[in-house]
Image: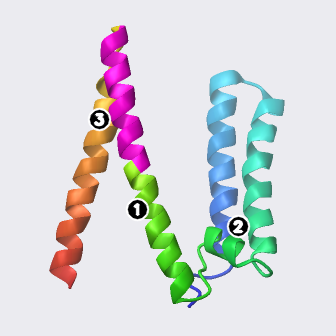
Amino acid sequence: MNSGPRWLMPATGLGLGFLVAAADYLRNGSLVGSAASFSIIVVYALAVVLVSRRSETASLLAGRPVDERWQSINLRALASAAVVMALVLLGAFVVAEIRGGDPMPYAWLAAAFAASYVGFILWFRWRS
């Protein structure tokens, strides 16, 4: 049931590491901070890939569920994380409103979340 090639996780970690390190360097101008940012992301990606050969959980984190049971666990975890993220965005919006801050970043994130949810419902309905 493994989905995706083995090199996808390390390649994604490497690309994301470069992106975050570049953003960190452009923002702070610190080569040490940028190297630390890069290292944390790349080491995590490599560790997950190396451990995934012996751990079904790490295999799932690497995007390669071992069977239908782990695929189901992944879907339930994603759905639960989406509910938590929606509640966090709503809470952050309300707290920003109460404190007199700018709630719009949270509103835009919540709108993007809701639009993508509805969009994917329509997409998957059309595809089924």
List the residue tagged with mark 3: 108
How far across and down, in percent of the image, does residue 92 sit? Answer: 39, 28
- Please state which of the two labelled residues, at mark 1 or mark 3, is closer to the viewer: 1
| Residue 79 marker | 1
Q: Residue at x 64, y 56 (%)?
A: 15
Q: Residue at x 78, y 81 (%)?
A: 53
Q: Residue at x 80, y 72 (%)?
A: 51
Residue in front for this viewpoint, 66 or 36: 66
List the residue tagged with mark 2: 10
- Please state which of the two labelled residues, at mark 1 or mark 2, is closer to the viewer: 1
The CA span between labels 1 and 2 is: 25 Å
Residue in front for this viewpoint, 3 or 66: 66
How far across and down, in percent of the image, does residue 88 sit? Answer: 41, 37
Q: Residues within 10 Å of mark 1 (few under 14, many from 20)?
A: few
On the image, which quarter does residue 59 sit in? Answer: bottom right
State the residue lying farthest toward the top. 100
Q: Earlier in the sequence, mark 2 or mark 3?
A: 2
Question: Up-down: is 10 above or below 90?
Answer: below
Horizontally, residue 92 falls left or right of residue 70, namely left
For label 3, the SS is helix
Horizontally, residue 10 falls left or right of residue 85, namely right
Horizontally, residue 24 falls left or right of residue 1, namely right
The range drawn in magenta is: 84-99
Q: Do labels 2 and 3 touch, CB within 8 Å?
A: no
Question: Up-down: is 67 above or below 89?
Answer: below
Residue in front for this viewpoint, 42 or 53: 53
On the image, which quarter does residue 11 sit in? Answer: bottom right
Q: Amino acid at mark 1?
A: Ala
